[in-house]
Image (spheres, rainbow, N blue to C red):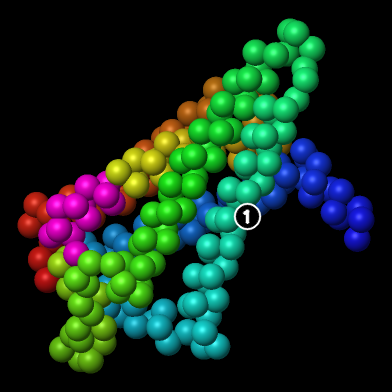
Amino acid sequence: MSKHRNFFRSSIGSKVVVGVTGLLLLLFVVMHLGANLLIFDSADAVNAYGASLRHLPLGALWIARIGLLAVAVTHIFFTLRLALANKQARPIPYAKSATVQASRASLSMVLSGTLVLAFLVFHLLHFTLHKVGNVLLSLDTIGRPDIHAMVVSAFHNPFIVMGYIGSMVLLTYHLSHGIASLCQTFGLRGWRNSVWVDRIGPILAGILGVGFVSIPVAIWLGLVVP
């Protein structure tokens, strides 16, 4: 038990936890975007997907939501631990500049990650628990929760649209740096492919960011209607 505890307290252990939780969160973001893009298909596709999630057995949907929050909090906690460790380090003079840069980069990732987590909580309160704003979830013509109409209605509010876009910009920034760090943690970044690995993060993050932002923008412009 003490070995495991010491491992997670170590720098290597913290990096592994950050890497694994980061990978889980990245997979969620990709799958969530895929589901959200159903808004461009049809109301039936969106509502059918929502109904399938609600009918998962043994409360699996809420287990997944709570698990997602736990993973996000764990990710931020260990990222903060690494940032503080870098800040408190006492390197030899020639390594001082690199350590300061690493500390600032880690702290910026903690800040952007924390803001994205705050958005996630708001997102659940808004679309899942209906505790924020005037969100009404009616039923469609065959008795399913009309998620399509709810989303379209919500994104006619300019403040919601701007807040969503701003949060997605933060997510894009966080992912653009996080994906490269993820590759390095799992040993996928070497001196031969470092340039390509460093490009993958911004490119993939940009694609995901554009995908998410396209939804509120399209609705606001009237390209998607109930």
- Determine which residue is flagged by label 1: 74
Q: Position of residue 165 (x, y in %)?
A: 27, 46
Tag 1, which secondary structure?
helix
Classify residue 170 by image quadrant.
top left
Q: Who is closer to the viewer here, 207 or 143?
A: 143
Q: In front here: 105 or 25?
A: 105
User: Which of the image's four quarters has the C terminus?
Assistant: bottom left
List the single residue furthest toward the right: 2
**Is residue 161 shown in magenta?**
yes
Decide whether the magenta segment is chiefly helix, strand or loop: helix
Give, as a single range, the part of the protein colored magenta.
Answer: 154-165
Q: Quadrant of the N terminus?
A: bottom right
| Horizontal relation, residue 170 to residue 6: left or right | left
Residue 66 relative to residue 148: left or right = right
Query: Relative to 210, does residue 127 appear above or below in the rendering?
Result: below
Q: What residue is shown at x 49% (from left), y 59% (from top)?
A: 28
